[in-house]
Image: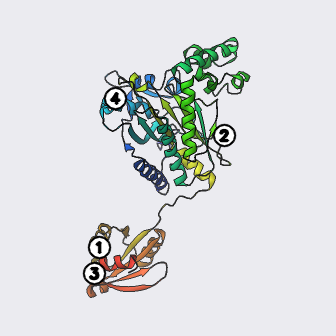
Amino acid sequence: MAVKIPRGTQDILPGEVEKWQYIERIAEEICDKFQYKGIRTPIFEHTELFERGVGDTTDIVQKEMYTFTDKGDRSLTLRPEGTAAVVRSFVENKMYGDPNQPVKLFYSGPMFRYERPQSGRYRQFVQFGVEAIGSEDPAIDAEVISLVMSIYRKVGLKNIQLVINSLGDQESRIAHREALIQHFQPRIDEFCSDCQNRLEKNPLRILDCKKDRDHELMNSAPSILQYLNESSRQYFEKVKHYLQLLNIEFVVDPTLVRGLDYYNHTAFEIMSNAEGFGAITTLCGGGRYHGLVKQMGGPEIPGIGFAFSIERLLSALEAEGVELPISKGIDCYIVSLGDKAADYTVKLLQDLREAGFSAERDYQQRKMKAQMKAADRLQARFVAILGEDELNSQIINLKNMESGEQKELSLNQFIEEFCQIVEGK
């Protein structure tokens, strides 16, 4: 019996993988302009990292993590998100001592969550994210949001909406927490068991519940914006002011709650409004976190970041009918006739590639007609034809596949002359 791919995963085949590479390349180029540097962390970490960093009341930790015990009886977990691991690395490698602050990082790689697979959501998915650690300036919040909006605009998304909220500082959150407990407690038995468990531990998580999101108490729950102290209110006003200066449109949603425990102050999501995208419209989520670095054993340093799924981004592009400018075709296909000519093209092919061209030759000992068909399938701009007669005369025939024009070139000077033709000289 054939072995099949695990449920909730996918093979990304040639023709599709180029789209992924294009998005990752665009994202990295924009990060470079914003002075964010790449970081790579392990695919698995100690389970405690995510229990402490993500929060033991979250769905991720309670239900969705891939956790296993290794041969040394250590509990390890495939990373379900990127922030906790980046912060762990920030602390472990003492990046807080870097004279250039804040430390601005980006990452990309597979994440793992055990959840029901659906359109654009997989159990193994690729996440691109950014973290800026070491600044309390609300301008860095606006910069991080500007960065991800720049990525979306660059790849061609148009029907998107930025939604923001403030979760306030610790004082504001404590006041809001007490109000939420008082609001939900009289009827908490009407909610799911998860919400009942979260009432005392972290009532803010109740607002993020998918099962009870239509309960009437959800709509009437006290808003965090009602409990922001003056400093939190001023912080949020500055973030909004900076976004306006950057001409970034946004909507304030007091019910927006990020699904991870380490967020405070600015929280944001970017939604797709594309028709037919699906019921789950969130493309990207992020926000500011205070206390996470200290929780990982570092100093009291704040940070802010975001992450988005490349699968979700590709689905949004498809919903909007956006065609990515993926380069197709090759520069030159070498057709050879006869054994001596075929042997000669081995080195000729390498010379073309070293000169910076994408090139291919026949490896099936096919006849000329079949080789020309192969060149068509590969969308070759030019076909170089070398037979034993041409080899004896030290010439090679070059055909422009678009115009049909054909000319003889010197075999010894082929690379130089081919360069001139391609460059239009």
**Which numbered disc, 4 or 2, marks the residue closer to the eye?**
4
Tell me which numbered mark, 4 or 2, is placed earlier along the sequence: 4
List the residue tagged with mark 3.
413
Q: Provide residue 215's location: percent of width, then percent of height.
A: 71, 24
* SS at mark 4 in the image: helix
Relative vertical location of residue 239 with respect to residue 151 in this rendering, above or below: above
* SS at mark 2 in the image: loop
List the residue tagged with mark 4.
91
Tell me which numbered mark, 3 or 2, is placed earlier along the sequence: 2
* Residue type of the residue flagged with mark 2: Ala
List the residue tagged with mark 2.
279
Which residue is located at x 52 percent, y 31 percent? Answer: 114
* SS at mark 1 in the image: helix
Instruction: Please tell me which residue lies in front, 23 or 263.
Output: 263
Which residue is located at x 37 percent, y 29 percent? Answer: 88
Tell me which numbered mark, 2 or 1, is placed earlier along the sequence: 2
Tell me which numbered mark, 1 or 3, is placed earlier along the sequence: 1
Tell me which numbered mark, 1 or 4, is placed earlier along the sequence: 4
Q: Provide residue 81's location: percent of width, then percent of height.
A: 46, 34
**Which numbered disc, 1 or 4, marks the residue closer to the eye?**
4
The part of the image, by quadrant, that contains residue 70 is top left
* Residue type of the residue flagged with mark 3: Gln
List the residue tagged with mark 1.
348
